[in-house]
Image: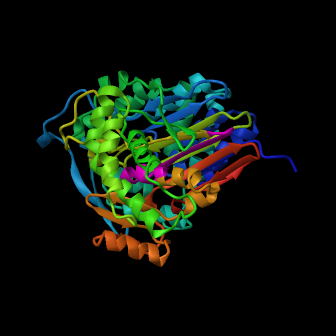
Amino acid sequence: MAQPSGAVAAGHPITAAAAEEILREGGNAFDAVIAAAAAACVAEPVLASLAGGGFLLAHREGAAPVVHDFFAQTPRRRRPENETEFYPVHADFGYATQEFHIGLGSVATPGVIAGLFDIHRHHGSLSMARLLEPAIRGARQGVRIEQLQSYIFDVVAPIYRASEGAIEAYGSLYPGRIHRQPALAATLEALSREGPDLFYRGELGRRLGQLSTEQGGHLCAADLESYEVIHREPLSIDYRGARIFTNPPPTAGGILIGFGLGLLEASGMDPAFPASPGQLRLMAEVLEATVAARVAVLAEAASSGELSSELLATYRERVAGAPPMSRGTTHISIIDKVGSAAALTLSNGEGCGHLIPDTGIMLNNMLGEEDINPDGFNAWPQNRRMTSMMAPTLVERDGCRIAMGSGGSNRIRSAILQVIVNLLDYRDDPATAVARPRLHAEAGHLSIEGGFPTEVIEALVEAHPAAELWPERNLFFGGVHLAMREAGGFAAAGDPRRGGIGLTL
């Protein structure tokens, strides 16, 4: 049997199959990630959309890594609040709720279409028409709704029932139903022929601008016409002998992961006991310190682009002084046969409740996401690239290359950090590293995912009496999809929390 010649990890079988199809045809990792991202907009519609935003961390074998930033941009003008459609809804995860704000007043300038064509221009080898074929086929033939996808729709049901267009496009998505999206298929076909100008300067943009103007949004034609993909040097972090590349400022996720790893570097963590009460209490303290330091970390990163030893020392003292026992997003990871790696994270927020008429494209609600609007709603700076928790990440050590990333709104940073620790400190294989139960610290309390040993949970609750216990693993704790290449071959792991799938080929 031939040795595997590539690895793919993604959040849905159709997303992963699109990448596999392109790799088997001879496409590279970047061809495959374009095909997979477009397919995700069909198969994972709550998590990804052509009107969302995202990031690609690309490392072509033999070249320096680069981040393609195609995240959302704030509009060039802000309409008065009494003229905008902007209101709260609540997502019910079953064990916790989270408030989101939707309506056309929550829509920021989308970047996904520009991003996919930019990736193709710089790294692609097959035609864009070929790369969009799997997504077009899936939209036209339909996608069978799985139990997890039905659950996700139920969680954000108020958004997907917010307008007649949303109800018509999504209806009742119960398990087993075949969900066909003919309007989205036609849009993808038109984009494959006409390119990104169809959206940013053509008919699709005109429809979006008219909808926004007439029904309470901020966007106008100038927002679309001026949108640009930004190429950035990734943030580089050394940890336990590995070099880690991740999303740099102005995004928040990567720098906070780096901050957490910096705290752990000198913590005395013992890799021999990965699930001990002491180790997990230490991780909880680090996650809480990361939350507490967020404002200071981002301020320093904005001014210098890196973390100072003084800031790390300040918060390391808090961790060392602890008792000794002390949103909608998806990700795609691909490594091809020559070792080039693509880690791409996409988000539509959760969607604003409106589709661009006759396109099948749900608009984002990035201006309604609390975690990426630190100055408060309706206070965003105009015409500015928004911050994000998304953090596509590469880990490289001793000839091993790992591409990873996660969905999960403000849980992204804690999910990726813990998987990195599992891989580098505990030397887990990819599937074990992804499957281990997780912690998350936010808003003054600790969330504990089901699956920890009883003695670990007791120790965590003793240290955090208000801790929130989840009875089982849940998509609340993110979805890390991971692809790896090492001397022994390829491996991949999709996160079961989000229906993830890992393939080697």
Residue toward you, 246 or 123: 246
Residue 249, percent across and down? 37, 32
Q: Can residue 92 be seen in this snapshot?
A: no
Extreme residue in the right direction: 1
Where are the magenta residues, as a range?
Answer: 397-417
Residue 245, given in percent of the width and then of the height, sits at 51, 36
* Residue 322 percent coordinates (x, y): 33, 60
Residue located 34% across and 58% down the image: 441
Q: Is residue 398 magenta?
A: yes
Which residue is at a point 42% across and 53% down the rendered structure image? 414
Residue 237 showing in the rendered view: yes
**In terms of depth relative to the viewer, which is nearer, 63 or 154?**
63
- Tell me how the rendering is colored: rainbow
| Count of all numbered marks drawn on residues in the image | 0
Between 102 and 342, which is closer to the camera in this rendering?
A: 342
* Above or below: residue 158 compared with residue 341: below
> Residue 305 location, x and y as percent?
37, 29
Q: Quadrant of residue 278?
A: bottom left
